[in-house]
Image: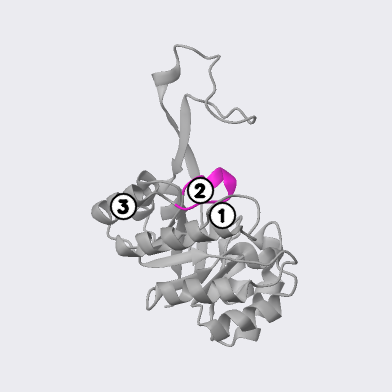
Amino acid sequence: MNHYTLEVCCGSVDDVLEAQRGGADRVELNACLMLGGLTPSIGALIAAKKLSKLPIMTMVRPRQAGFCYTDAEYATALADAEQLLAHGSDGLVFGFLDADGSLDVKRTRELARIAGDKTKVFHRAIDVCSDWKKLLGQLIDIGIDRVLTSGLAPDVFYGVDVIRQMMDFAQGAIQIMPGAGVNLKNVNKIVEATGCNQIHVARFRDVADTSTSNNRDIFFGGALYPPEDRYSVIDGDYIARVRSRL
C-alpha cells in the first residue's frame, strides 16, 4: 500500500497542533496566509518545535506580491533563513525570480547553500515563471529538493496535466508536490492524475474571540476589514478526513 505524504499549510502554532491531530506528516509554517504566506516569527517556530513532533518547513518570504526583491528585502530573507535554521527549522521554502519571471539563479543558489543538508523547497513562484521547464532544470542543477506547484493554474485540479508533465520532465530528480485548492472531493483525482506521492493541503475553521465585542466599529486590519471577533485555525478534523481518503 502506497503512503502519501500529507503536508499542511499552517499560519500559527495552533495550526501546527491541529495539523498534527489530523494526521499530517509535515507542515509548512508561515505568517500572514491571507497574503499568500510570509516568513513566520522565530517564536512561532520555537513553540511549534517544542509542542509538536512534526517536521516543520518554514517559509522565507519577506513581503507579499511577487518574488523579485530589493537588496534590503533579500538581506532580510538571508537573515531570516539563518535564524530559522538556527532555531530548528527542518527546511526552507523560498522562491526568487527576476523581473521577467525567470529564475534568479544567484539568489536561489545562495539560499540553497545556506540551507545546507536541510530540505530546500521552491514554492509556487514557479506558477508565474516565464518558462517552467527551464526553471525546473535550473532548480535540479542547484540541488533543490522539492517544488510546490498548482501546475500553473489558479486551482491545482485544473493544473494536473502540467504537473504530470513536470513529473515526467523531472524523472525523479526533484520532488513535485501539488497544492492549492486540494480538498476531500478532488484529492484522490489529483493523486491519480499526477502520480504524485505527496500533497499540500490547507483547510480552516473559524474560532471565536469575543475580546473585541465591546466596540464593533473598530477594525485593526486593512481595507478588507476582516472580522475582529473570530479568526481561522487549521481544521484538524478535515485534515484527518483527507488523511483517511489518501
Relative depth, front residue between 198 and 240: 198
How many other residues sit within 10 Å of disc 2, few (<14), some (14-19) or many (≥20)? many
Q: Is 17 placed above or below 158 here? A: above
Front tag of 1 and 2: 2
Q: Residue furthest front?
A: 71
The percent position of residue 56, horizontal first and vertical second, equals: 37, 61
* Of callouts 3 and 1, the N-terminal one: 3
The percent position of residue 235, horizontal first and vertical second, equals: 44, 45
How many other residues sit within 10 Å of disc 1, few (<14), some (14-19) or many (≥20)? some
Tag 3: residue type? Answer: Ala
Where disc 3 sits, the SS reads: helix
Q: Is 45 placed above or below 122 here? A: above
Residue identifier under label 3: 48
Residue identifier under label 1: 183
- Distance Cα–Cα, label 3 vs label 1: 25 Å
The quadrant of the picture occupied by the N terminus is: bottom left
Task: Say the numbered circle drawn on residue 203.
Answer: 2
Callout 1–callout 2 Cβ contact below 8 Å: yes
For the record, the magenta segment spans: 31-39
- Distance Cα–Cα, label 3 vs label 2: 19 Å
Where disc 2 sits, the SS reads: loop
* Of callouts 3 and 2, the N-terminal one: 3
Q: How many dots with numbers?
A: 3
Where disc 1 sits, the SS reads: loop
The percent position of residue 176, horizontal first and vertical second, equals: 56, 74
